[in-house]
Amino acid sequence: MGSPALPCHEPQHVQALKHANHVRTARSELKRKIASGHTSVPQVLIACPSHAATMSVSDLLMSQKRWGKTRSHRLLLSAGIPDRKPIGTLTERQRTAMAALLELRAGLASNPVRPIPPSQP
């Protein structure tokens, strides 16, 4: 989209198919990077790359390891965001709030609260 109008000999539907394939490929690569830990969901939410703009927030959350429908639904419910909301339609405030919430949860997961052992008499 955003490219200047150049005379092209391909039919419009072929161009649309190529663009859709490019977006699908970029999204699958993004999901692989998130699953492997090379990219974090808060980074994607803040940057909002063009290929992820029409991706739903729940799909982005579920691309993380150990995140399924239930966990992502609970997080989105606590943030007041619908499951199928596209990332590109989130406001800046919603993006930063979601990113902060995810970073907070990641910090709690990496530093679990351990019970204090009882003192010995």
Image (cartoon, grey):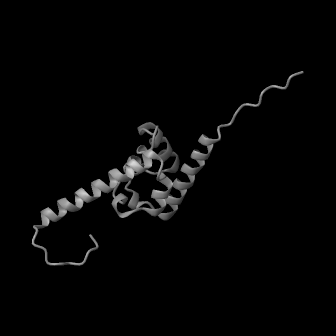
Q: Is residue 54 above or below residue 32?
A: below
User: Residue 10's spot in the image, x, y percent?
Assistant: 11, 68
37 to 3, vertically: above or below: above
The residue positioned 52% from the left and 54% from the top of the image is 98
Q: Quadrant of residue 55?
A: bottom left
Q: Quadrant of the N terminus?
A: bottom left
Residue extending farthest right: 121
Residue that protrudes farthest toward the top in the picture: 121
Residue 61 visible in the current orientation: no
Q: Nearer the viewer, residue 53 or 66?
A: 66
Labels in figure, total: 0
Q: Identify the image quadrant of residue 69.
A: top left
Q: Position of residue 20 (x, y in %)?
A: 23, 58
Any part of residue 8 in sight: yes
Q: Residue 75: x, y in percent?
A: 50, 44
Task: Name the side, left or right, on which 56 lies relative to 17.
Answer: right
Where is residue 29 shown, x and y percent of the image? 35, 52
Residue pictured at 36% horizontal, 49% vertical: 84
At x 54%, y 56%, the residue is 97
Q: Say if 88 sits above or below 77 in the image.
A: below
What residue appears at the point 32 percent right and 56 percent down from the top-left corner? 26
Classify the position of the C terminus by image quarter: top right
Q: Is residue 16 left or right of residue 43?
A: left
